[in-house]
Amino acid sequence: MNRLLKRQIKHAYGKDFDFNQLDDSTRELLRRVESAYDEFNKEKEFLEHTIKINSEELTDAYETIENHNLNLKDQIDIKQLIFEQYTQAIDATYLVSKTDKAGVITYANEKFIEVSGYTEEELIGKPHNIVRHPDVPASSFKDLWDTIQQKKIWRGQIKNRKKDGSAYYVYATVFPLIDNQGNILEYIAVRNDITNRVETGKKLEKEQKYAHMLFNDQENVVFTANSEQGILNANYKFLEILGYESVTMFKKDYECICERFIEREGYLKATTDERHWTQDIFDYPNQQHKALLLDKDGVELIFSVHLKSVAFEDDEFVIASFTDITELEHARELAITSEKAKSEFMANMSHEIRTPMNGIVGFTDLLFKSNLTPKQKQFTEYIKNSTSILLKIINDILDFSKIESGHLELDITPTNPFIDLRNAMSIFKAQASQKDISFIVNIDSSIDECLMMDRLRITQILTNLVNNAIKFTPEHGTVDMYAKHISKKDNKERVLFSVSDTGIGIAEDRIKSIFQSFIQADNSTTRNFGGTGLGLSIGASLCELMGSKLQVESQEGKGSRFFFEIEFETCSSTPTLASQVKYNPIYVLDHDEPIHDEIMLQLNNFNLDTVSCTFENLLCGESNDNIVITFNHRHYKPLSQISSKVIVIDKSEEAFKVAEAENILYHVGLYDEAPSILYNAILAYNQVPNSQMFNEEQTDISLNVLVAEDYEMNRILIEEMLQSYGIEPDFAFN
């Protein structure tokens, strides 16, 4: 029985009720009721099953809808984020504004505010023409309004004005916003600030116009060309000189400008199968290249030609510039002719002036040796000195002329600085003594004994400097000339030459001009001291010719120092001092002063075999007439018994007296003033026998002499001079 029915019957009749006690009709009724209950339970189970299935489907559908909603939300968030980024990008880059249908601003982004210079409050509610520039015509804005009111998009460039009045340029896109009814709601304008681009374009256009103007206004003939097309473009000067209206018309007659060249020695030649006319210019860019052309009137013109190869945007072409130097070349030819005439004149003048000058000098010397009264001797001395000054002036002018014309050439020969420079400086000893000037000559013993130099020009520079130094140094002053070893590498030696003095010095404002021709330190210098003002100019030019520079350091009232450095090649063609010493070693007597060590260092630098010993040991030993150097004048007499080659280095007054009395050949009184004299003393002792040094001048020489001289005064002079030696010359007049 159905459990629900059974529970209800037991509830009605009691739980101990026996259903079998019921009659058949009642039991039948209960069966029908039970059957109805079963049908109800089946329907209930079916409905519950159906509801369960539908609930599950609804749950799945809800979950699907919920997931879809979440996905839509994520997509909306992403698109919102992208939209915001787009907006930020637009706001950061573009000027954005919105206006109502009447053109009143309703929105302006930060970029618009920043560029315009207005605040947001100053823009909102104002007509958009607040940023309109007065230079922009009204017709431009009429076209804009006609376009957007027809619901179309307008694009174009606009010139606007900032709050401060300055201009800026934008490229604007203006479009209407329309509702679903097709009505215009408002206008949006998006602008790109193109001020820099516009201004750069204007500047470029201006530069192009300027370049075009320069190109055409050039006094030079200028054109561009390449190998494929020939001449590409040419300026007005090109067309004017060659007589054409355009490059196209020129190219109808000629393929190359070189076809207009007149071929002559020294000028560019036209292109051949073997060589293009530009090849020489590119091969030798540092040389001047000239072209000879006929202009439209048939006149020969000379041009200096310069070429430049240019690569531009994968194209290669040549820029050619032809500078008209016709007048300059004619002037140069005239100058060359004049210079040649001047050189010939100076050469003739050199001969014509020096010839009588030689006669004056020679006859003055002869006159000086004759029996003259003291007064006559004095006058003769004046003539001799004046003649020497005049000769120096003439030599300076002739040298200056040679340098100026570029005809002076160096004569590089092997030179021993210890002999040649020392000898050149010795002529100033008497001049310095007259003014009681301490004249120091010091040639560094580290310098090589054989240098390749133009000794005449080096000597000329130094004698000019020393002569000036003595001239401008007052009595009791000092003049110091030294040559110092600077460096040596391979076969090159750099030497510093310097001449310093304690003279009048040079004013600071005159130092820069002191090396100019005919310039002296003061306007009164020539009057007070004499000279041409050419010495320093010649010295500076000679230094430059030898790859050096003459420099000066000076302080007015305290003295000057002139110096220059020159690099020489070393050589071995002149014999060294060590190779000429006949008897080794050289004895140097002991001495408790620094000068002893200085002497030993100098002798060692010359690679000489030296022995330091005492006076007593030397006297007791054997000697082969070796050179002996002593620092005590008292040693001279006993030493002269064992050697005829004694060098006394002693600055005491007694030494000077003994040297004069004993006729000491080499007495060095002031070693500091002439350290390099030691070299010459040792050399002299080994080159000339001592007995010959004291011989009187021979006055009778047996010679046959032929003299070729066309100047009569010189023939008289030479005859007089030769007759003093007992020689009767034969003369040829040409």
Image (cartoon, rainbow, N blue to C red):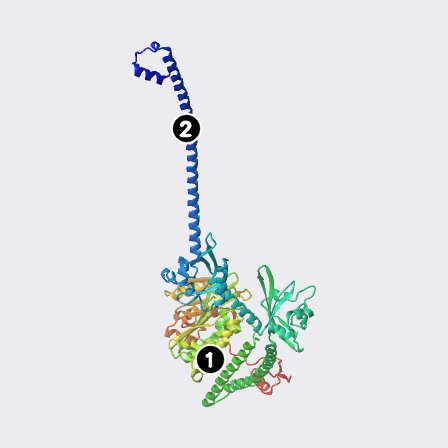
Q: Amino acid at mark 2?
A: Ile
Element assignment for label 2: helix
Closer-to-camera residue (270/628): 270
Question: On the picture, is 505 further left or further right than 251?
Answer: left
Residue 382 pos. (x, y %)? 47, 86
Closer-to-camera residue (527/666): 527
For disc 2, the neighbor class at 10 Å (few under 14, some 14 to 19, many from 20) is few
Residue 180 pos. (x, y %)? 46, 51
Closer-to-camera residue (493/659): 493
Q: Is residue 11 above or below residue 522?
A: above
Q: Between marks 1 and 2, how big is the CA–CA gap? A: 129 Å
Residue 129 in which image quadrant: bottom left
Q: Amino acid at mark 1?
A: Ile
> Which residue is labeled 2 in the image?
51
Question: On the picture, is 91 further left or further right than 14?
Answer: right
Question: On the picture, is 305 further left or further right than 29?
Answer: right
Image quarter (top left, top right, bottom left or bottom right) of the N terminus: top left
Image quarter (top left, top right, bottom left or bottom right) of the C terminus: bottom right
> Which residue is labeled 1 in the image?
519
Eye-nearest disc, 1 or 2: 2
Question: On the picture, is 301 further left or further right than 554?
Answer: right
Q: Name, please, the residue furthest toward the right.
A: 273
Closer-to-camera residue (182/689): 182
Residue 316 in which image quadrant: bottom right
